[in-house]
Amino acid sequence: MSTRIHTIDRHPDTVLILKRPTTDFAIWERLGDEIDSPEDDVEIGDIKAESPEIEIHYLVSSRHLMLASPRFYTMLADSNWVEGHRSDDGRYHINVEDWDEQALLVILNIFHLRHKEVPRELELEVLAKIAVLVDYYECAEVLELFSDMWIEKLRKDVMVPLIYCRDLMLWLCVALVFRLSEEFKTATLVAIRWAPGPIGSLGLPISPSTVHKLDRRRNTAIELIMATLDLWLENYQSPEYKCRVTKYNFECGAYFLGALTKGMYNTQLYPLRHVAPFEGLSFEALYAKVRGIVAMPRSLVETWDHSCSLEETVGKAVEDLAQIDGLAIDQCSGFEDGDGLA
């Protein structure tokens, strides 16, 4: 095993040892009807094969670590932790693993006020890796001046994606950790509308309760449309159905029952009923199917002076249901989420 050393403090009393630097950060698995993103074309095996075993040693100051991070303070100030005792070489040794080498170097340089060594702009991927560390070490305030600068520049070049993809989840992570309310609401809305199955955290600091809220809102949105289709199938086939403009109750109901049933059959929404978690079906895909059904030509019904349509029944109901909001950031947190599941 080889070793690489980053000397951050000229008089270090601590060695931060990164074992097994991450080689599979936020791996993406495609699902259902999602749209491919170029960044998603990554093979897990290929990444790991290119990364030989290596340890990264960061020579740092325990005082700077404790001032910057409550987690480091607990490790080094509490003698009950093995990290709180000096090793034979007279230094504290802290072992970590699965972090990104460069992201960890960035935050340690900031902790030690080595600002000339800190990049002024970052790609989304690197910022997400830093966000993971910020969440774990609870050091958002220490990085605030730099994170504000990184985010401001990133906003100009990289918008929150409008499809469900890996970059969307990276933005969601960054928005959650750095408390970006607008980006968080946009990212969660896109996830709710476009995810073709249960939403995964990709190992990012997105708490189970936040994922649960996203999945529940997605499932509810899809279920309400499915229930609306079921309701209008029942309405049209009911002997109590009343045409709103003519006395031809039976003919009107029969026509639209047939049109709706055939439209659902042609779009694989009938006869099999989709149920949660709606694998392979996103809200947007379902919405598009329904819009296609209700947009059917009306020439036949117009021949007998009849103005009823699926658009003003099913279509109107679905349009109302399509008004979905993303999550508010104050309802959510990172890994250590103590809030409820509302």
Image (spheres, grey):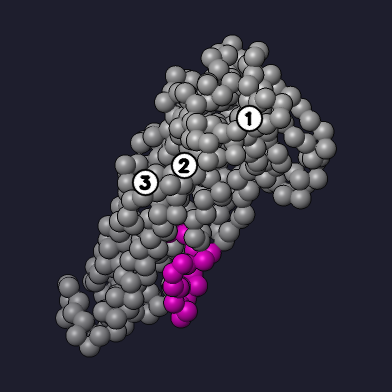
**Which range of residues does the magenta coloring cover?**
265-285
Please provide percent x and percent y for residue 326: 35, 47
- Residue 312 appears in the figure: yes
Q: Amino acid at mark 2?
A: Leu
Please provide percent x and percent y for residue 164: 51, 49
Residue at numbered disc 1: 86
Q: CA distance from mark 1 to mark 2?
A: 39 Å
> Which residue occupies 63% across, 34% down?
94
Residue at numbered disc 3: 332
Q: Is residue 34 above or below residue 95?
A: below
Main secondary structure found in the magenta portion: loop
- Residue 297 appears in the figure: no
Question: Sequence-wise, which precedes: disc 2 or disc 3?
Answer: 2
Q: Is residue 306 above or below residue 82?
A: below
Q: Amino acid at mark 3?
A: Cys
Q: Is residue 230 above or below residue 131?
A: below
Foreground residue among 312 and 60: 60
Q: Check the picture and name the quadrant holding the N terminus.
A: top right
Q: Report the disc number at residue 131.
A: none
Residue at numbered disc 2: 172
Question: Sequence-wise, which precedes: disc 3 or disc 1?
Answer: 1
**Which one is in front in this view, the residue at disc 1 or the one at disc 2?**
1
Q: Residues within 10 Å of mark 2 (few under 14, many from 20)?
A: many
Q: In terms of secondary structure, where does tag 2 sit? A: helix
> Which residue occupies 57% across, 45% down?
166
Left or right of 21, for residue 281: left
| Residue 329 figure quarter | top left
